[in-house]
Image: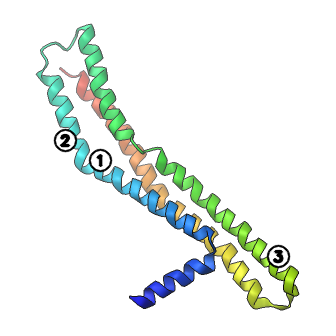
Amino acid sequence: MLELQYHFFDFMDKGGSVLWGILLLTGLLWWFVLERLWYFSLEYPKDLKKQLQFWLERNDHSSWYASYMRRQLISELDCAMSNHLKVIPTFIALLPMFGLLGTVTGMIQVFEVMANMGSGNPRAMADGVSAATIPTLAGMVVALAGIPFATHLERRYKREIIHINQLFTRE
C-alpha cells in the first residue's frame, strides 16, 4: 500500500502542480457523472411515477388549468433530469485546457533550466519535459473517457423528455 502511495505521489510530482488541478477536475467530473447515472437509474423512475400518478388522478385533462398543470409537472421532471447535466461537458472541455496549461508550465521549467545551466544538463531538462507531457496526457485521457458518458446522459435526457411528453398527453 505504501509503495502504491509512493508511486502515486511520484507521478503527481513529475506532472507538476497543474496535475493536482486535473485530479480535482477529474474527481468532480466523475462525481457528477455518477450522480446523474444514479438519478436516472434509481430516482427518476420514482419521480416519474409520482408525477404521472398525480396527473392521472386528475379528472380534468383538457381545461386551461389542466394544460398549465401538465406543463408544470413536465417542467419539474425536466429540471430534475437536467440538473448538473451541462456541468459534465464543461469539465470535459476544461480538462484538455488544464493539460495545455501543464504543457506551458513544463516548458517554462525547461527554459529556466536551459537559462540557468545551459543545455548540458539533460536530467534537469527531462524533468521539465515530463512536467510538460504528463498533464497533457492526463487531461486528454480523462476528457476522452468522459465523452461517452456525457453523450449517453444527454441522449437519455432527450429520450426521456420525449417519453414524458407522450405520457402526459395520453388520456
Q: Is residue 89 left or right of residue 133?
A: left
Image location (x, y in percent) of residue 42: 23, 49
Camera-side mark, 1 or 3? 3
| Cα–Cα gap, marks 1 and 2 | 10 Å
* CA neighbours of label 1 inside 10 A, class few (<14), some (14 to 19), many (20+): some
Tell me where residue 135 sits by quadrant: bottom right
- Report the residue marked by disc 2: 46
* CA neighbours of label 3 inside 10 A, class few (<14), some (14 to 19), many (20+): some
Q: Which of the pair 156/29 is nearer the observer?
A: 29
Three-letter code for the amino acid on which mark 3 is drawn: Phe
Please, is residue 55 above or below residue 39 in the view?
A: above
Of the image marks 1 and 2, the number of the one nearer the N terminus = 1
Tell me where residue 154 sits by quadrant: top left
The residue shown at (72%, 69%) is: 105
| Cα–Cα gap, marks 2 and 3 | 58 Å
* Quadrant, the C terminus: top left
Q: Which of the pair 85/171 is nearer the observer?
A: 85
Which residue is situated farthest in the top direction here?
Answer: 63
Q: Is residue 41 left or right of residue 117?
A: left
Q: Classify mark 1: helix, strand or loop.
A: helix
Please, is residue 108 above or below residue 13 in the view?
A: above
- Report the residue marked by disc 1: 40
Image location (x, y in percent) of residue 28: 45, 58
